[in-house]
Image: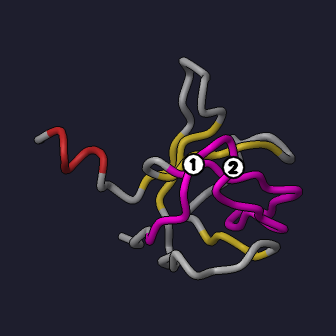
Amino acid sequence: MSHSSIINCPRIFTEPESTYAITTLLTESISSIQDNNFTISATNTENFKASGYIQINQEIFFYQSKTKTTFNNVYRALKDTSRKDHISN
């Protein structure tokens, strides 16, 4: 697997500075024009904290709550990152 294919993979990583990354896959794409306070759909969020930061590719998000398959009340482009398009699998 090449370096660029790893970077472009639609995985969500929790705790951007953590050395123990929990991953899941996006089930719906995210547009760069998506406003704050939205929902991110994923295959499984059970191992993630009740609220916290996640990283998708180079963009950092904060979610206020979650269900088994969604991150809710999401705010994006945090910690000096930029809004990007993110594709689902």
Give the residue drawn at x 85%, y 47%. Answer: 51
Give the residue drawn at x 47%, y 59%. Answer: 25
Give the residue drawn at x 77%, y 64%. Answer: 74
Q: Report the quarter where the N terminus lies.
A: top left
The mark found on residue 39 in the picture is none
Label 2–label 1 contact, CB within 8 A:
yes
Q: Residue 46 in the image: x percent, y percent?
A: 71, 49
Mark 1 element type: loop
- Say which of 81 and 12 sits in front: 81
- Say which of 22 and 74 sits in front: 74
Q: Residue 86, located in which quarter of the rendered image?
A: bottom left
Q: Is 12 left, or right, of 65 in this rendering?
A: left
Q: Residue 68 in the image: x percent, y percent?
A: 73, 61
Kindly give the residue lying farthest to the left in the view shown: 2
Q: Which residues make up the magenta segment?
A: 59-85
Q: Is residue 79 magenta?
A: yes
- Which residue in the protein does label 2 denote? 78
The mark found on residue 81 in the picture is 1
Mark 2 element type: loop
Q: Is residue 11 above or below residue 86?
A: above
